[in-house]
Amino acid sequence: MHFALNNLLGRFRIATCVAVSVALSGCNLLPASGPYSVEVTSQATQDTDGVGYKLVPMTAQVVHVLTQLDCEGLIGTFRNDRRPIPDIKIGVGDIVGVSIFEASSGGLFIPAEAASRAGNFVDIPTQTVDSNGFISVPYAGQVRAAGMRPAQVEQEIVERLRNRAIEPQAVVSVKSQRSNSVTVIGEVTAPIKFPLTSAGERVLDAVSRAGQTTSKGYDLLVTLQRGNREATISFNRLVREPANNIYLQPDDTVYVFSRPRTFLAFGASGRQGQFNFGDDSISLSEAVAKAEGLVDQQADPQSAFLFRVENRTTLERMGVDVSALPERRIPTIYQINFREPTGFLLATKVPMRDKDIIYIGNAGSVEMTKFLNLVLLGALTVESMTNANANIYGVN
């Protein structure tokens, strides 16, 4: 009797040790599909392994900033280049023609027997603007043309010939423009480089010149590169929003490509994995619905997270302190509270971006159930071992 009681107490102490050891180790021994909610929200984990991130609660102000940025498109990135039509000037490599007129014959260019001529002008052979930006005009010498409008070059030629020719006039025309051009490349049937004209060409004009594409409109993206800046917009949105169909500028590059935009869903969602947008744009609420929502028996509605890399300026516009993070693009986790009705309303306005990650944390009761099951498993294991030893040694 005394031995059996000691045996029972021993099993209880072992099971208790198992429970305590699990508790002391935190929840790391419990199975999970991702980080626990407390780990995401803890200030101590926001700079792990040198990768700092900002945790931003999804508020009306945050949603307002995100919505504004999504609506800007090309016009937002190039807001300082909203000139209606580019100012086309002569550039290096352009082929230029010059015609010089005189008021009467017997001058510098028109001989005395000009009566037999078709007109009172002479055409100078076409020439290419040299690498230094000059063209050559008889009796006027080297005249700068690069970076000048034709009218400015005409005026310079007239000034140089004024005291040598009879009331000279000049006409400068660009026969072939090679410098003020735009390049269109990518998934098009006929990549092209074409010159801009004074009439003005827009982004869609450039895309139409390059031929057809075989991709669906919502999977087709158009990137405009200008200097050290670039912006990307879906083809359907470019067609639908004329404000984004901006005028092209010299040396722009238009890159047309297809790429199904996707997002990832993990944690306590109905389905986990990668999902296509399947449209020009989708909201956070639509993305959660594509992942079949939150699992009723598992998810914590207060612990829905949206992972993405955000621009520093965007976080600053939200009022987030990013002074401790020097990077231009900062890893950011937005926290959405789906337990509140406003959480659903805000999620309908949050635009998803390509390669966003949605993570739904487990409810605390789920973690407790896992913990208790692990303790119970430990106790049952100890009891089985004790019974086996009793059978071996014949102890009742």
Image (cartoon, rainbow, N blue to C red):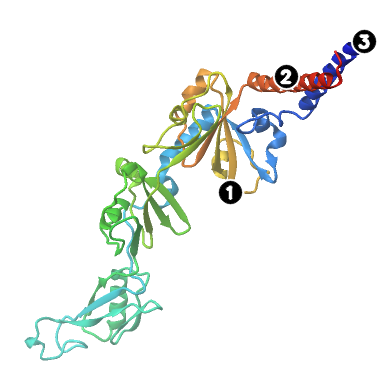
Q: Quadrant of residue 380?
A: top right
Residue assigned mark 3? 2
Which of 341/10 is in front?
Answer: 10
Task: Name the kind of residue labelled 1 in the image.
Answer: Arg
Q: How busy is the neighbourhood of tag 3: few (under 14 within 10 Å), some, or many (20 plus)?
A: few
Circle nearer the N terminus (3, 1): 3
Residue 78 visible at all: no
- Relative image position of residue 142 (x, y in whole percent): 35, 83
| Side of 136 relative to 374 (left or right) | left
Give SS at disc 2: helix
The answer, for residue 321, to whether it is visible in the render is: yes
Horizontally, is 308 left or right of 37 in the view? left
Q: Nearer the viewer, residue 20 or 168?
A: 20
Q: Give the alpha-carbon distance from disc 1 to disc 2, as whole Å.
A: 50 Å
Q: Where is residue 127 shown, x and y percent of the image?
A: 28, 80
Q: Secondary structure at mark 1?
A: loop
Q: Residue at x 14, y 86 (%)?
A: 105
- Depth check, mark 2 against mark 3: the one in front is 3
**Residue type beneath disc 2:** Leu
| In the rendered image, the vertical position of residue 315 relative to residue 105, given as above or below | above
Amino acid marked by disc 3: His
Find residue 328 and name its label. 1
Compared to residue 138, the image places residue 38 above or below, namely: above
Picture residue at 30% right of the left edge, 40% below the top:
240
Q: Which residue is mark 2?
A: 376
Q: Residue furthest right?
A: 2
For the residues bearing labels 3 and 1, Cβ distance under 8 angstroms: no
